[in-house]
Image (cartoon, rainbow, N blue to C red):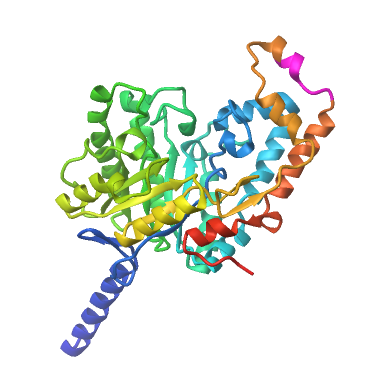
Amino acid sequence: MSKKLFYTILFLASSFCYVQGQMFFSTKGKYITGPDGKPFQIKGTNLGNWLVPEGYMFLFADANSPRLINQTLTELVGPEQTKTFWKKYLDTYITDEDIRYLKSIGVNSIRVPFNYRLFTNENYMGDNDSTRGFKYFDRLIGWCKKDRLYVILDMHCAPGGQTGDNIDDGFGYPFLFESAQCIRQCSNIWKRIAAHYKNESIIIGYDLLNEPIAHYFNKEQLNPLLEPVYKQITKAIREVDKNHILFLGGAQWDSNFQPFGQPFDAKLAYTFHKYWTAPTRSVIQDYIDFSDKYNTPIYCGETGENNDAWVETFRKMLDSNFIGWHFWPYKKPNNPRGIVTFNKPAYYDSVIAYANTPKKNFEDIRKHQPADKLEILKALDGFLENCQFKNCTQNMGYIKALGFVPKN
């Protein structure tokens, strides 16, 4: 081989490696940087209620976790019809039309909450195939690649439960932090996900645990366990994927960064959530101070659930500090506090009434089950129809409050 040819090949190889390195999001000091290496401000929404159903977005009060929602539906229509409902729901609640629409109004990225059970043989949303999570992720990512809408994958529900409330689909306590087996399972699931998507540049990164350790519990006992768990998950991911940013949420609903020390990985960002506070810089000053102290990026993974004036004020405050954000949520029924909404279907009041009726035993279940199951099936079919993008209505004021442009 001639020297000239050798150096040409070497140059091309090094150029290819450089281009490959630039394909992915990264961190540089206090900034998240895009594939072009420039600072990138995340601006978007959460696909809440899709892969992790939440009771209030089904208009339920007490049946508020995926497990309790599933139990309610099964008591109403039986296991076969419930399984059919979930399959259709997963295929219709979020489609390529939703992704195309979000891009069209100015959204640049989405956060995707998911339940670890989608990557196990545990029964969840009508199935128990340990690869089904990849089916839904792959399909979504394909749509996002087509429209250049970037993605953060968020483990909203971890093995054992990381929060200790309905949102982690657990059992009322953050058992994850006290179970080596659950931590291993969580790490292994993240490793599988990271291995599958290690070369996928549409993905910004992975939000490792949503809202760990609710404030009800012994913070002195549990908070010191948070960063070691993050380190164990990070170690597993970095064995297969060094490309993507890892997002670490603070203790007490992603609000408390005190358990964190010096960043322990080259591509970390720290995420906070803020609800029902004053929309002022003072409520996020601790996070800004943390970012300044460690020269590391921060990002608001969830906020919102408020009126348009609050949303606009808080969003502008985040923008003025170049802090990225994903407001919560994208879609829910009969509610202006989201980008789009859809109507409650006919007969659905019977579903709500049953879900909200206390039932201590099987006698109570039998006593309160609606006599007309056909009406219940019509209500569930109506929910599946109404939640489709074609039947959703834009919340104009909310969209404008986010700085986006509603579609004509």
Q: Quadrant of the N terminus?
A: bottom left
- Total numbered circles: 0
Q: Where does the magenta region start and end?
A: 365-371
Q: Position of residue 69 (x, y in %)?
A: 61, 30
Tell which of 269 and 278 is nearer to you: 278
Residue sitting at x 28%, y 55%: 242
Residue drawn at the location 73% of the way across and 26% of the way down: 76
Residue 173 in sight from this viewpoint: yes
Tell me, yes or no, whether the highlighted magenta stretch contains residue 333. no
Quadrant in which the C terminus is drawn: bottom right
Determine whether, in the image, residue 94 is placed left or right of residue 12.
right
Q: In this picture, is 259 found above or below 25? A: above
Residue at the image point whose x is 35% and y is 56% from the top: 318
Vertical position of residue 188 compared to residue 196: above or below = above
Residue 369 inside the magenta-drawn segment? yes
Q: Is residue 22 above or below residue 185?
A: below
